[in-house]
Image: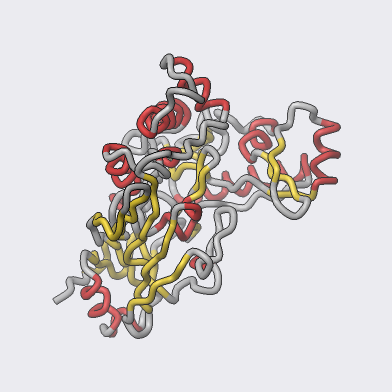
Amino acid sequence: MINIEKNVSLLPYNSFSVDAVAGYFCKITEVHQLQELIQSSIYQNNPRYILGEGSNVLFTKDFQGLVIKIEIKGIEIVQENEERIMIKAGAGEPWHGLVLHCVMNDWGGLENLSLIPGTVGAAPIQNIGAYGVEIKDRIENVEGVDALTGEVHSFNSVECRFEYRESAFKHELKGKYFISSVTLSLTKKNHLLNTDYGAIRDTLQEQNVNALRDATVKTISDAVIRIRRLKLPDTAVVGSAGSFFKNPTIPRKHAELLQHEYPSMPLYHAVNQNVKISAGWLIEQCGWKGKRINNIGVHPHQALVLVNYGGGTGKEIFQLAMNIRDTVNNKFGVLLETEVNIL
């Protein structure tokens, strides 16, 4: 029998460390529990929110409904040959733990995604990415449980409709499926290592590793971990949800006008004659980097990261985010979109 609790504090379950109360709360460790939950009256008669590690959500108020924490674990080999291996991971597995498991076995493909917070189940929803790699390039399929019938359905990478920080699970499939597992295709040898980002090359050089000749799955993972630890706060000490805003994509003409006025502005190629620009750079140019307002603020080493120093509320953090968004829009004519889910 599945255990549904009432009036549960969500403080231990979100990396922003803000307090909010869930009207109902339950933990799911097996698919059959999810199928059982779907038949319950509490599930059917209340709004619902799916929670992984709580590393990509900001609670601005109590949630008057059912919070479902997915803790389905397990990592198994589905198929392998001399060149490649496919592994299936439960949606509740910590993402970084999965990456370290792959690095330890010298399976290539996820090393650039080291130390990203969250669970495996959240990875395809957000199409997580870092340092030139997106999870869409490694996903073979995603299994989901139908939110109405409890039936398990498999979605291939095309059906997931991946885009930059986007997927079908954020749009047409939102709320219709619970992700239960993700199957990834990785290399066992002849790894296609991505060391294009300057920060990775610089860090490898500091460790006396030649990026083109000597880099390995492990050295790249170690470099990414080092970079992220230097730039990002430890959520065990300071509340945060990582990057709060997406890097915006704007028309090339707009980007060229901005770069003419701000020659140091970094630009990155995107699709369809659009250009991606750094949200962190825009925020920093507006003077927000390192700014603190009572118990909340902007991280001193990464302007994309909003932080809760202790005692800050979700409403205060949200208001700070909106003030940053408005300032950037007024100065650059670029409207930032949040990467974090706001509730």
- Which residue is most to the left? 1
- Establish if 45 lies above or below 86: below
Instruction: Depth check: give the residue in front, 242 or 178.
Output: 178
Quadrant where the image shows the N terminus: bottom left
| 193 to the left or right of 319 | left
- Residue 64: tell me if it is visible: no
Q: Is residue 23 left or right of residue 255?
A: left
**Residue at image coords 73%, 31%:** 265
The number of discs equals 0
The location of residue 320, given as percent across then percent down, is: 57, 44
Residue 262 pos. (x, y %) = 80, 30
Residue that lies at the very extreme toward the front in this rendered image: 82
Tell me: residue 299, above or below residue 12.
above
Q: Residue at x 78, y 51 (%)?
A: 273
Instruction: From the top left corner, tell me how far across and down residue 56 is, in percent.
Output: 44, 52
Q: Residue at x 80, y 46 (%)?
A: 252
Which quadrant of the view contains residue 198? top right
- The colour scheme of the drawn protein is secondary structure
User: 67 or 115, which lies in front?
Assistant: 115
Q: Residue at x 28, y 50 (%)?
A: 12
Examine the rendering and report whether any part of residue 306 can be seen: yes
Residue 139's place in the image compared with 148, above or below, is above
- x then y, percent, for residue 177: 40, 73
